[in-house]
């Protein structure tokens, strides 16, 4: 192992050792990165969450001029609960040319490579900006304020590279996500007296059926964005809770659902359509039994899609660095759409495969880490 490879390995091990499952604080990791950058003479800015339990971090390396490149990654990881791991998820082990550990591909492998290469960024003519976010895995909740702070305080970057696991291939579009919670309030009655009550469960079933019909309509009629799999917007109900007994008409039912939209198929229109159906066809029946019965829907989290554009400077940059003429699209949601919405040309490119993300025995191959290392080194050369 070369000195550089050892440095990269050490950094990945350190990052993975911090248990930054989204429900926990990421501050220990952020402090570690801040101290590390400070040792290399680099100032960092933290952008904390409202409760102060978490923080985003950004830092600029090189001159304070426009035309730099943002390297972005999230610091949180998904939970390990119930997953059959064969080793400690927070301790990296190497087996068969792979590094195993929670976050190895999503996405501490990328962050480890970037941070380990910071000492090589001493002669930049255009800056490299590091952007580390929190709460990506629970709906990209940290990145909006991070991006806003960067846009306000940094000279305009030319491109953003989000190091999600893409097998080091440029991903130029991804879906957006909206998570919603619908609450149905009905009116209780004995189930032998259905004419005296209004079941929240039965009304929720009709709403869910409407969503299922909509999902089928999107699958059959689009809009379609080729390269995405599936190529259409999906609508899915993941959790339903309601009722207390088989012989009681339910007063209460809640269901959680998501819309994963293709670029251009805006979720607001779907939500508005759903609410109109609910207003016109579900609520009147409920409110005939109880005036305070009804349906309410709230957006829990939302992140925009990354849309392919003709003049994306980030795509050209990543293509020239990877030597790949191919571009791909991803069905998963990521922070790319948020950077694009802030007016920054954005592409996803990072080591490892999304097939291993969120799984037990998550891994990144050493070959992918090598490719990412050469990629970042070429970027440094390009900007030096
Ligand atoms: Zn990720």
Image (cartoon, rainbow, N blue to C red):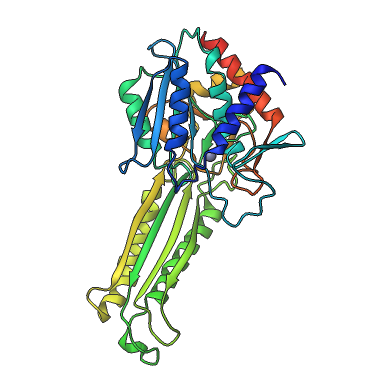
Q: Residue furthest left?
A: 291
- Give percent across and percent down for residue 72: 48, 29
Residue 54 rendering spot, x and y as whole percentages: 39, 39
Residue at x 46%, y 55% (from the top left corner)? 258
Q: Position of residue 102 (x, y in %)?
A: 59, 42
| Residue 38: x %, y % from top left | 43, 19
Residue farthest to the bottom, as pictured: 192
- Above or below, comparing residue 333 to residue 378 in the picture: below
Answer with left or right where residue 380 lies relative to residue 144. right
Image label count: 0
161 up-or-down from 284: above or below? above
* Residue 159 in view here: no
Residue occupying the point 37% across, 30% down: 147
Considering only vertical position in the picture, is 31 above or below 318? Answer: below
Q: Residue at x 37, y 63 (%)?
A: 182
Q: Is residue 191 left or right of residue 9?
A: left
Out of 226 and 203, give the one closest to the viewer.
203
The N terminus - image quarter: top right
- Seen from the viewer's position, the closer of residues 127 and 115 is 115
Between 156 and 13, which is closer to the camera in this rendering? 13
Residue 195 quadrant:
bottom left
**Near-viewer residue (94 or 127):** 94
For residue 73, say whether it is visible. yes
């Amino acid at each position: 192992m070369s000195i550089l490879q050892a440095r990269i390995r050490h950094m990945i091990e350190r990052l993975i050792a911090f248990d930054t499952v989204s429900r926990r604080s990421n501050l220990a990791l952020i402090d570690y990165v801040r101290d590390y950058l400070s040792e290399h003479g680099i100032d960092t800015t933290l952008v904390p969450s409202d409760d102060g339990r978490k923080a985003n971090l950004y830092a600029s390396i090189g001159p304070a001029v426009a035309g730099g490149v943002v390297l972005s990654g999230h610091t949180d990881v998904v939970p390990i609960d119930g997953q059959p791991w064969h080793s400690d998820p927070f301790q990296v082990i190497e087996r068969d040319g792979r590094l195993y550990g929670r976050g190895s591909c999503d996405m501490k492998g990328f962050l480890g490579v970037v941070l380990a290469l910071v000492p090589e960024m001493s002669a930049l003519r255009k800056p490299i900006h590091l952007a580390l976010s929190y709460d990506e895995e629970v709906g990209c909740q940290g990145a909006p304020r991070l991006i806003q702070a960067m846009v306000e305080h940094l000279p305009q970057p030319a491109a953003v590279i989000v190091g999600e696991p893409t097998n080091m291939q440029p991903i130029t579009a991804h879906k957006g996500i909206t998570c919603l919670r619908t609450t149905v309030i009905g009116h209780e009655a004995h189930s032998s007296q259905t004419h005296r009550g209004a079941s929240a469960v039965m009304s929720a079933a009709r709403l869910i059926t409407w969503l299922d019909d909509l999902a089928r309509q999107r699958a059959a009629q689009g809009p379609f964005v080729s390269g995405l799999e599936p190529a259409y917007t999906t609508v899915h109900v993941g959790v339903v809770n309601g009722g207390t007994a088989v012989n009681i008409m339910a007063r209460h039912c809640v269901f959680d659902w998501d819309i994963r939209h293709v670029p251009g198929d805006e979720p607001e229109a779907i939500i508005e359509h759903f609410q109109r159906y609910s207003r016109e066809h579900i609520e009147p029946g409920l409110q005939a039994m109880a005036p305070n019965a009804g349906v309410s829907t709230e957006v829990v989290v939302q992140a925009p899609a990354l849309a392919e554009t003709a003049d994306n400077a980030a795509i050209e940059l990543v293509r020239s660095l990877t030597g790949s003429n191919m571009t791909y699209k991803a069905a998963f949601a990521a922070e790319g759409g948020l950077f694009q919405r802030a007016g920054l040309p954005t592409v996803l490119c990072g080591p490892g495969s999304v097939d291993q993300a969120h799984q037990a025995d998550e891994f990144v191959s050493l070959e992918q880490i090598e490719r990412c290392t050469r990629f970042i080194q070429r970027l440094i050369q390009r900007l030096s």
